[in-house]
Image (tube, grey):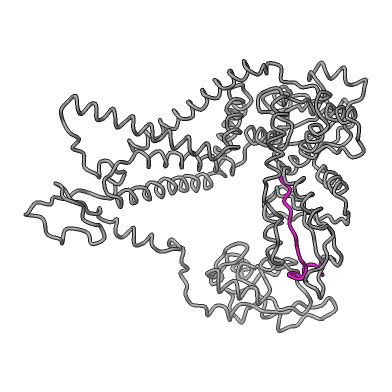
Amino acid sequence: MHCMWAALVLLLLYMLTVFLGSRVLDIVLWCTTEQGRQLVDPFLLSVRQLKQLLETRGVSHTGYIEKQELAQLVQDSADVTTAEVSELSAREQEKLSSTSDSFEFTGSAHFYEQVEDTKDSVWLVQVIPAGRDSQQAPLLDDYTWKFVHNHVAPFAVRTGIFNCNYGRRLCRSKGWFEPLLLLALPRGTKPKDRVVLRTSQLNRPQAIIEWLREELSIRVHKISDVEELEKDWLTDSSSKSSRSSNDLSSSEVKVLLLTHLIHPPLFLAALSIKFTGRIKFGMFTLKKDESESLKKRVGRTPSYVITTPEGVTIYGQRKGEHFNFKSMNTFLRSIQPEINDIFLCSLLFVNMIVLLQILQVSVDLWWKKIVSTLWIIVSHNLFLFWVWIFVFGIRRWPLFGVVTDSLLVFVRYFWMSQLGTFVRSDCQVISSHPVLFIISFILFGYVAKQFVSFRSSSTQTQQGTPDQRTWWEVLPLDCLFRPISTSPLSSSTSHIHPYVPMPGPGPFDTQLEEGIEMLIERLAVPNLWLQSHSHNSDYIKDLPVWKVPSPTDEPDEEVLLRMMDSNGNSDRQPAAAACGEDCAVCLEGYQIGETLCGLPCGHCYHHQCLMLWLQTDNHHCPICRWPAYKTHPHQHKYHNQ
């Protein structure tokens, strides 16, 4: 525990060192390059730089040839800062050196798993129709497809290629008989929700990007008049006298674009998909008579206005707030984080503490170093996972919601302050240079270790006493081992655990604490006690089986009796109402004449799909996880009725 607190102090000291070093670097750059005024006149930039800015922001410049027209388009999209211009060359090199290719799906199941995996993923898929020749000509050639991929990848749009030869049934059911482009958008705000599929046969890159922008803009609300703008978008929620009880803090964060453009930039449209259900996005196209009145409220136009329950702020006026997807995504994730963001941050901090503890360990034998390292890594990460399991278990408590709302208010106050802006800017720089971050952190831990060793040796030299600590006092393994005497009276090997190697000469030896042997043997089981209590598969033959009838067929009396009675076994009665329109295992719809099989919980599937599932999933329902061999409570209710 002492070593853990020491590592935590060192971590805070490292973060403080990085923060102070960044501020010193900012002062040096401000004095040497005269960056006191950060706004840049776009008319002073080259045509190449103007086009790069428009592509980074996702603003179409098709039809604009003259430099004056491009500069005016950049000025209408947002202000230009010196830091944003300096990043253009780095982004261009990053795009040229990028080796990421499009995703290739291996089948229908793979397509469903990836495309419908999360609620905030946007997929652009090139569909190659099935045919005798396995190498059918796609809609776009390799060069055009790579060009489109490089332009949409910075906006978190994932690309892939699906060959219908690997999923003929899916293509036949969807009607994909010709080469086409498929755009998959999340329809709802829940995880694992269905997606909306849009198709197109455009083959020009600029036309494809324009089509993508129009489809992604469905979540950006177009504000019609000034009254709606003043009432719902430029007034912070905290100043409203009356507010409905359904308005939660998470739904009151809004992003408003005041611009002269007709369509929103692609980066804003992509963010509206990513933050669906968490942040509301809007756009208001300014007119000449409205620009002067709004300038008094928001200052310069165009501008991005961020409205939260704590107040209204203008995005882009502080360090690191650039008008592109990466910068604004970092800003919005900081003021409105989701549970996964907090988990990743906690995982990063815990493993930074782990690395510091590993660097502070001083032992003589190499196997002790390995054992200590493994124990630190496993114990700390297991403890973190147990904490998160506990958090997920209590998140439905009313008090938990009150605490999280209060913490969210504190988080927004911090990240929207000047201090939070500096910290966020430092995090962006660190994430852009991960190798430099790792090397500097390891070097800091090594220097701290040498400093502690020097202080310890100096103290011992002054006192004239050597270090008498044993290795179990240095390692964080004292909770697992205990010293035993190795005097001649107790040197029998029967006192030493057979799985613990004997150390070198010394006044003490060690053995495992009582009960640890049993724990290690139990942890060696891969499924961690999640074995089923039933190892008998005889219940499978009692599951009800029937075929999907046609609408004109008369109900079979024997099938109805089997569904109601399940061969006279009341514990196997399915609930027909719980049968959906498609099978949750293969994700295909039920066809007339196909054999179905039901479970005690009331869910039904294709017979062959369910048999394969029960053989590999330890006898549980794929949807509700109710054991397939156990009586469900609703069956007793039906029989009592």
The x and y percentages for residue 162 are 75, 63
The part of the chain drawn in magenta is: 156-173
Q: Is residue 158 magenta?
A: yes
Q: Is residue 541 magenta?
A: no
Q: Is residue 308 left or right of residue 222?
A: left
In this rendering, is residue 143 above or below 288?
Answer: below
Furthest residue toward left: 489
Q: Nearer the viewer, residue 581 or 416?
A: 416
In this rendering, is residue 561 above or below 5?
Answer: below
The x and y percentages for residue 478 are 27, 45
Q: How many marks?
A: 0
Q: Nearer the viewer, residue 64 or 160?
A: 64
Q: Is residue 21 left or right of residue 506?
A: right
Q: Nearer the viewer, residue 352 or 137?
A: 137
Occupied quadrant, residue 217: top right
Q: Quadrant of the N terminus?
A: top left
The x and y percentages for residue 540 are 57, 78
**Which residue: 33% across, 58% down?**
519
Occupied quadrant, residue 556: bottom right
Q: Nearer the viewer, residue 221 or 242?
A: 221
Q: Is residue 61 left or right of residue 612?
A: right
Q: Is residue 236 left or right of residue 352?
A: right
